[in-house]
Image (cartoon, grey):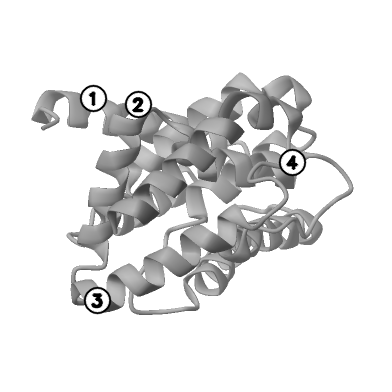
Amino acid sequence: MISTFVRNDMIAQLRSKWINLSSKYAEDEKITITFWDEILKHYTSNNRYYHNLYHIQNMLLQAEEHKSVIEDFDVLVFSIWYHDIIYKSTKKDNEEKSGLFAKKALKKLNIEEKRRENVQKLIISTKKHQIVLDNNQDNAFLLDFDLSILGADWETYKNYTHQIRKEYKIYPDFIYKLGRKKVLRHFLDRETLYFTKAYRLKFEYQARENLLKEIELL
């Protein structure tokens, strides 16, 4: 259980990060606060057990760690902020809606159209976790950040599976387990789970061990 103090401290840090990023493109500071309120509302809704601000924080920290090899850092970070802003476990178009949401928001922040489109495409790439922008490694890193949880130690991974199950609590076990196994096997059938060399070396083996163990337990 995370204390209220830790949670509030994290939210304050994230708010500061968002304002520092978005204020570079906003003519009016009020709009950066308005957008932050939207982000906070979406990622702290009651159905967010995993796809919440902790997930965003984790990805932002990874982005900072690899900043030197990311070509358009702000576009990548905007993609992180918005990639799960629309999230309903019963829907199959969350990524498309999140991408459109981001594109519309960034237009108000005076970000040029090409970069807005790149944010939208990066977000949509998280749907099937396949690269759609291959002119640099930014898309690869985004996807690897998003799936880094798969290569965590078993206890952390197990907690993640419990959080995902809560997000899909509307479904009975026999339906959930069938769908979950399909997703896990889809990942295992890929040549590699991760696209960047750094993440393959760090997480690939453990991720496959975790996926296989979860399948056995389902």
The answer to whether marks 1 and 2 mark residues whose Cβ atoms lie closer than 8 Å is: yes
- Residue 13 is tagged as 2
| Neighbourhood count class around disc 1 (C-alpha, 10 Å): few under 14, some 14–19, many 20 upward | few
Residue 134 appears left or right of 102: right
Task: Give the structural element (helix, strand or loop) at label 4.
Answer: helix
| Neighbourhood count class around disc 3 (C-alpha, 10 Å): few under 14, some 14–19, many 20 upward | few
Q: Mark 1 vs mark 4: which is more N-terminal?
A: 1
* Residue 159 coordinates in the image, percent (x, y): 25, 40
* Mark 3 to mark 1 CA distance (whole Å): 39 Å
Image vertical order of residue 135 relative to residue 209, above or below: below
In the image shown, does 109 or 97 lie closer to the viewer? 97
Q: Which residue is mark 3?
A: 174
Task: Give the structural element (helix, strand or loop) at label 1.
Answer: helix
For residue 201, what is the image quadrant? top right
Residue depicted at x 51% and y 66%? 98
* Residue 103 coordinates in the image, percent (x, y): 62, 64
Q: Which residue is mark 4?
A: 138
* Nearer the camera: disc 3 or disc 2: 3
- Report the amino acid beneath label 2: Gln
* Residue 107 coordinates in the image, percent (x, y): 63, 61
* Residue 132 coordinates in the image, percent (x, y): 77, 60
